[in-house]
Every structure is written in C-alpha cells, then in structure tokens.
Amino acid sequence: MSVVATIISEDGAWIASDSCFYDDCSVYRTEYKKIFKHEDILIGVAGKTIIIHELRKMVNETQFNPVAKDLIDEDFVYTNFIDHLRDNDVVSTLDGLWNILINTGKKIFEIDNNFTVLSCELPYASIGVGHAEAMGSLMTSSLLSGKIPLNGTDLIRAINVSKTFNQAVREQIQIIKL
C-alpha cells in the first residue's frame, strides 16, 4: 500500500514516497522509509516491504556498491543490480508483488516482481497502488509548465494528489534529493 515517485530535472533528481505500510499480519505502520540514497543513486520500493530492508542490508553489508556509471541501460541494471539480489539471497524474500525504482540522475529504471527491468522514457516515474494519480499529477505539471517537473515541489504535489484519491496512500511524505 504505497506510492513512490521520482523525477529528473535540470535542477537535480528527487525521489519521494508516502510512509505507510501493512506488515505480514496486516498491522498498519507509519513513518516507514520506502526510499533511500546510496552514493549517486536513489532507490525506492513499493509492495513487499521486507525488500527495502534487504536492499539496505545488501548495500551496507556486502561488496555490492551500485553507482550510476554501472546502471546505464536495462542490461547493465540486470547485470549490476539484479544479479546481486540473487547472489546475496535477497531473492528468497521477494515473493509477492513488489516494484523497485532506481534513479541515477540521468535515467530512471523500474524493476518488477518478475525481475523485468524497464528504462523509463519520461523523466519521471512512479510505482505502487497510487502510481496512476502520481503520474497524472507529474504529467499535468509538465504540460502546464511546458517543461519537465522542475523540482521537489512537483513531486510532493504528486504524492499529495495520490493521497487524496487513493485511501491506501497515507501518512507523511518523505523526499530525498540526489
């Protein structure tokens, strides 16, 4: 139950999310961190919540060190990211539905629960149950300004729109700038 959205603009890259989830016992939790920054990339997770913990652990406790120069296209993301998920046994925690967003500051990639890697054509993307509302807001901001979303304000607006129209998107907005 979430939304994670990210943008790339001339002024930088941002990722934002709501901060609510339901654990395996359907217990509502707040202030949950679904996004983080590692070196020069931003990572966000929607869906199965254990993934964010496993990703952080993998990045902090192993030799895996994803950096933007290694994540230039779908093949490189598969080789330099997904293979490490498998090598570090993160895959065993990945049953159920989940999506990962990776923002390198130059490209945005989405990884789904089938390990499909998609390079986003737009300079913004979102995942989670509130993704349609967030994408609509980002697209509207882009069309009205005649430019891509300019800063984190457009991203916060997108998460708020998602919260307004989707009851599963809740709690405080978290945002990180690259």
Image (spheres, grey):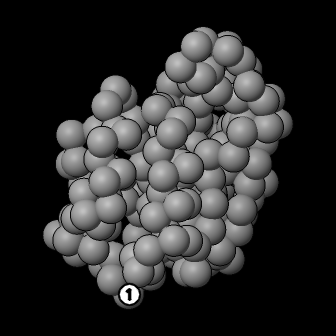
Q: Amino acid at mark 1?
A: Lys
Vertically, is 95 above or below 151? above
Quarter of the figure with the N terminus: top right
Q: Which residue is outermost to the bottom?
A: 69
Q: x, y (%) of residue 165? A: 66, 17
- Closest to the observer, 41 or 123: 41
- How many C-alpha atoms fall within 10 Å of the one at disc 1: few (<14), some, or many (≥20)? few
- Closest to the observer, 158 or 100: 100
Horizontal side, residue 146 vs residue 58: left or right: right
Q: x, y (%) of residue 130? A: 56, 27
- Closest to the observer, 118 or 158: 118
Q: x, y (%) of residue 50? A: 51, 39
On the question of residue 136 being in view, the answer is no
What residue is at 20 percent from the left and 71 percent from the top?
79
Q: Quadrant of residue 80?
A: bottom left
Vertically, is 69 above or below 37? below
Q: Secondary structure at mark 1?
A: helix
Q: Quadrant of residue 171?
A: top right
Horizontal side, residue 129 vs residue 69: left or right: right
Name the residue carrying label 1: 69
Vertically, is 129 above or below 108? above
Quarter of the figure with the C terminus: bottom right
On the question of residue 93 being in view, the answer is yes
